Amino acid sequence: MNIFKENNCAVFTVCNLAYLPKALVLAESLLRVDGELLNIYIFDKKIDVDLPESIAKFIWIEDLFVSNLYQMAFKYDITEFSTSLKPYIALEILENYEKVIFLDPDTCLFDSLKPVLQDLEAKPIILTPHYVHPHSDQLPDSDIGMMRFGSFNLGFFAVRKTNQGLDFLRWWSDRCIRFGYFETQFGLSTDQKWVSIAPCFFSDLYVSFNLGYNVAFWNIQERMLEKLPDGKYLVNGEFPLIFFHFSSFDEANPDRLTKRPLSETNRHRKDLVDLCFLYKSALDAKKIPASKIKYGFDYMSNGDYISPTLRRAYACISKELPADHDPFDSNGPVGKFAKLNNLLEKNNTPYKANSFGDVPNHRREFLIINFFMRLILRLLGPNKFSNFSRLLVYLSSFRQNRDLWKL
């Protein structure tokens, strides 16, 4: 008998249409190692598309009847939106099941999830830390990354239906729905940062040190892989590799593992290169027409692009709008607000985020900004300049600056 039916457990992931190939690779791997269908919750506007229902169950987020769904889809970008409802969906699933396991769509199973089910028999909440040994002080950020993004990687969690398990999900869901923003300058990192404080409130929460769970670029420096004759992998010669998290996977350069910064030593390890090309091949086999469709909640009803600035401005004034408003209606109050405040891109160009790695490409802009910052320092003096700098951090979150927006 299927171990998931024996344990009355469901496995789910969340993604938009563009991420479907990754979710399908995960679904196929779950079907292969455990004979179980993955529940894929699609965070996109519902349209008529062909989906491979033989390897997964598909649930459109619009069919869940979530309260204020469209307001959430507008104030959050796709990453914030899909992560904000993960605990909510887990609660929905536990109305019909005893256990639930979540996996990010860019994870892939290499062995059975049976150890996770066994963990759930002992503890009702299972989490994994980003890594289990302090980063070397020689690394640029040392352990600062974990301070910014949270102790636990929520690309995986598992919960059993107990009083504390349900209390954990209710607490986490409330925080994610209200404050699921990616604003690390204010201690917010979508769904993840909240769970850093969860051990303070839930004594039955279990932090797993199984190194075969959630292997990824952020912990690969402490985990060596060994391929076995049967095609499976061992981590550090001891732990079966249960699932690998291909976060920020570089499809154009699979041997680099991730688009994120990573030491060249870890990029070119043979055990990783083999795994990456295996994953790339699986992704290529799952390319479907639906994955080429633009994210539906990125556009107003007339096709105008919704910029991140407009999303944050909307979050600031949304409670002042009629309760039944449709934020995506170009002729509605949000459309008028966007025009009044110059929040629409003239060329309808989608947003592309810059990172710290892009700083060298903007030297001219930094020279200009630093010129004006030195001028402000001279005018204000060092004490007031420090307060001015802190004010800039506060103003970086447009949703908290009501005086900026006309309504």
Image (cartoon, rainbow, N blue to C red):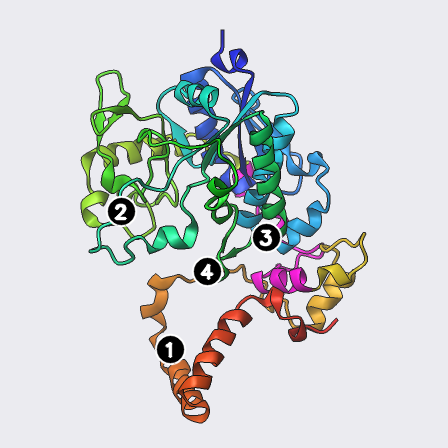
Q: Between residues 351 and 150, which one lies in front from this camera angle?
A: 150
Q: Is residue 390 above or below residue 277?
A: below
Q: Which mark is residue 179?
A: 3
As measured in the structure, the alpha-carbon distance from the residue carrying label 4 to the one carrying label 2 is 29 Å
Within 10 Å of disc 4 (Cα), the crowding (few <14, some 14-19, many 20+) is: few
| Residue assigned mark 1 | 366
Which sits earlier in the primary sequence, circle 3 or circle 4?
Answer: 3
Q: Residue, x 41% and y 81% (percent of image)? A: 369
Which sits earlier in the primary sequence, circle 4 or circle 2?
Answer: 2
Within 10 Å of disc 3 (Cα), the crowding (few <14, some 14-19, many 20+) is: some
* Element at label 2: loop
Q: Nearer the viewer, mark 4 or mark 2?
A: 2
- Which quadrant does the C terminus fall into? bottom right
- Where residue 357 sits in the image (x, y, percent)? 33, 62
Q: Between residues 254 and 180, which one lies in front from this camera angle?
A: 180
- Label 1 near label 2: C-beta < 8 Å? no
Q: Is residue 161 left or right of residue 389?
A: right
- Label 2 near label 3: C-beta < 8 Å? no
Q: Which mark is residue 134?
A: 2
> Label 2 amino acid?
Pro
Which sits earlier in the primary sequence, circle 3 or circle 1?
Answer: 3
Q: Is residue 313 left or right of residue 189?
A: right
Q: Which residues are magenta?
A: 290-316
> Label 3 amino acid?
Phe
| Residue assigned mark 4 | 353
As measured in the structure, the alpha-carbon distance from the residue carrying label 3 to the one carrying label 2 is 29 Å
- Where residue 345 sits in the image (x, y, percent)? 60, 67
